[in-house]
Image (spheres, rainbow, N blue to C red):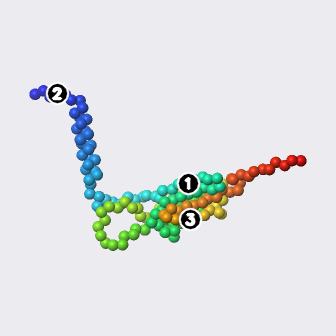
Amino acid sequence: MLVKWEPMMGLSRISDVFDRMLDDFFSMDTRLAEPVTGLVPLMNIEELKDEYRVTLEVPGMEKDDLDIQIKDDVLTISGEKKEDIKEEGTLFRRERWFGKFTRSITLPTDVNVDKIEAEYKNGVLTLHLPKSQEAKGRKIQVKTK
């Protein structure tokens, strides 16, 4: 028996297998899935005219759960988000992260570390790192004689 050769037939079969794999993956029972670990809060660092601004997303935390330290020109922000399970029950899906985190950045040399301020509002920690007076520069007046 002769079979007509169709070069695209193989690709069609591969496509069917791939579609079945994706369907199986996305229809998996996620009730027993392990929690994602090792996540760190997202952070932005901006340079403005008079300061650097660091913002860190830490929703669901209290300001007392955060620790901010500077040592050897390294800014370290750490904290712990505690799990808030109040009732016994069956957890069907876990995507929220809990646990300890640490983020460290090396400060630019022109930061005035004595005047750094931190504020926490709506789950966002904002650090204001003012530039030193030397970094801002100064205007020199020209005198006439």
The answer to whether residue 111 is visible is no
Task: Give the percent coordinates (x, y) of residue 141.
Answer: 80, 50
Q: Which label was assigned to residue 124?
A: none
Q: Residues within 10 Å of mark 1 (few under 14, many from 20)?
A: few
The residue wearing badge 2 is: 4
The alpha-carbon separation of the residues under discs 2 and 3 comes to 73 Å
- Looking at this view, name the residue that lies furthest to the right: 145
Q: Amino acid at mark 3?
A: Glu
Residue count near mark 3 (Cα–Cα under 10 Å), binned few <14, some 14–19, many ≥20: few
Q: Which of the 4 image quadrants contains residue 115?
A: bottom right
State left or right for residue 120 relative to residue 143.
left
Q: Nearer the viewer, residue 102 or 19?
A: 19
Q: Earlier in the sequence, mark 1 or mark 3?
A: 1
Which residue has dot 3 on it? 119
41 relative to 24 in the view: left or right: right
Residue located 31% across and 65% down the image = 91
Does the image show residue 17? yes
Q: Observer-nearest residue: 62 or 67?
A: 62
Label located before the other in sequence (2 or 1): 2
**Mark 2 and mark 1: span between their CA atoms?**
63 Å
In the visual, does 90 lie left or right of 111? left
Q: Amino acid at mark 2?
A: Lys
